[in-house]
Image (cartoon, rainbow, N blue to C red):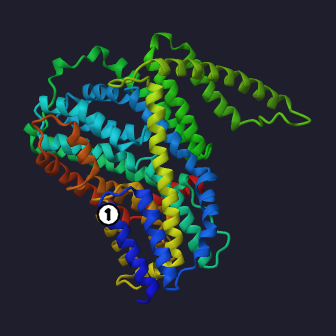
Amino acid sequence: MNVKDILDVLMFVAVCGMLLAGFPVAFTLAGTALGFAFLGHAFGVFDLSLFGALPSRVFGTSMTNEVLIAVPLFVFMGVMLERSRVAEELLETMGMLFGSLRGGLGIAVAVVGGLLAASTGIVGATVVTMGLLSLPTMLKRGYAPELACGSICASGTLGQIIPPSIVLVLLGDQISNAYVDAQRTLGNWSPDPVSVGDLFAGALLPGLSLVAMYIVYQMAVAWLKPAAAPAIPKEEIQARALGRRVARALVPPIVLIVAVLGSILAGVATPTEAAAVGSIGALLLAGYRIDAQHGRPIIVAAIGLVVMLVAANTVDLRIARTHIPPRDMVGVVVAALATAGLAWGIAVSLARVGRTKAEGADVPILHDVMRSTLQISSMVFVILIGASVFSLVFRGLGGDEMVHKALSGLPGGVFGAMIVVMLVMFVLGFFIDFIEIVFAVVPVVAPALLLLDLNPVWLGVMMAVNLQTSFLTPPFGFALFYLRGVAPPEITTGHIYRGIVPFVAIQLFALVLLAAFPALSTWLPTVLFK
């Protein structure tokens, strides 16, 4: 190894060590990179003039990147739905719907986990909410503590893989950049773009498959060990009002999911545009839930939003034209009326969430949501800037070439390289957050893997499933800590660790299945986006 390779390895080891020691991620990435840049300059192997490209690099990857605008919008959508107690009503209603079956509460948790993943995508909030609401109920009904804890942790992490997921948005941006770099290295200067929408479509089937596997496991446990997953007595389930409750709990989230995810998969909207629609939908839903008796403005706004989406994709709404055909003029008038109705509903919803206090908080819901959105989004973008500095120095020291040579020289070729990368990401997931892995590890390994002619969508989905698995893995899985923080006193850490083992096995089986059959992630994007 030459001096450059030694510095690259030491820089990566130093970053991992400082992250494990608990130093702030963004400052660790940028500070370590700067230190090794000056060290490389002292040895004559790094040109400090490369930092002249840093402002344009940050501006291009952060400030003018339309894809990353989806991050704060999806965060706002998820936090607003969580604060408006959509999850609570879903859990209670699904528990009543499936409760008469053995293992029904576990099935309900898996179904609600999938629905919340497709509407919020925030793992911590989902695990905490289900832990507070479902865990006491499952224990009261006689569920084995291990099964109850494992079900909640695993279902809560579905937001990592089921779109619209913040993980997929960030991964999609990184994979897209790495794919372009790899194709240019191979001499292809006009590669087909890889978008976040491709990753959303690719992750949908694997995500739904995981939900199905969780449900099958719940049913198997209920059949083999009936005492571990008993049914709720039928006389305790209010059958008369159940249909109305199911409709009230399910219809709004499903409509929101269809509006957001459906518009992306149908090619009607980009992920950023769909995230904006989801944010407005979540705001309207929160306003409706606060005062359903005076829900007319919200209903009018929801109809207006749908009309605007349909009109925008069926007629030409541009008014800066010398001649507007009658059909287009009708569309413009209808869209204007729909906009007025939407503005009315948004104003009413903002007034309601602006004066209603969030449960357990001393501030209104809107204030709480905006503060949480700002904190999470700021963390993501500050880490992105730190990662840009790290990536610049790593490449300036020839790290990309070193990684490519190391991976291409492994036994087993492409397969061996994938196994090593997946193992590294899996182990790192024990200790550091997925955002840190996406920004610190993916830019290092993805270009080298894509130079080996891997499908970028398949690679991105594999990484997403792997990161979800590491979220569950003892001893440092974040989902386990979230549940531990809200679990009743009778639940021990041992219960949580033992309960998660079967679900980790399911996750690993899904990862192997995805590796063996890449079409699980590539078929749907091919069909939808050709």
Picture residue at 57% right of the left edge, 15% below the top? 297
Q: In the rendered view, would you say 523 is above or below 416?
A: above
- Is residue 273 toward the left or the right of residue 375 in the image? right
Q: Residue at x 55, y 68 (%)?
A: 179
* Residue located farthest toward the top when viewing the structure as drawn: 293
Label 1 element class: helix
The residue nearer to you, when weighing 515 against 74, is 74
Find disc 1 in the rendering and name its residue: 428
Q: Is residue 2 left or right of residue 213?
A: right
Which one is in front, 251 or 431? 431
Comparing 395 with 425, the one in front is 395
Left or right: 406, with 450 as reference point:
left
Name the residue rendered at 33%, 58% in the picture. 432
Q: Position of residue 286 (x, y in %)?
A: 46, 24
Asked whether residue 448 is in view, the answer is no
Which quarter of the rendering shows the N terminus?
bottom left
Q: Which percent across, then down, holds residue 76?
A: 49, 36
User: In percent of the image, x 49 and y 40: which residue is there?
Assistant: 374
Residue 124 placement: quadrant: top left
Say which quadrant the C terminus sits in: bottom right
Q: Is residue 335 visible?
A: yes
Residue lying farthest right? 322
Circle 1 packing at 10 Å, graded few (<14), some (14-19), many (20+), is some
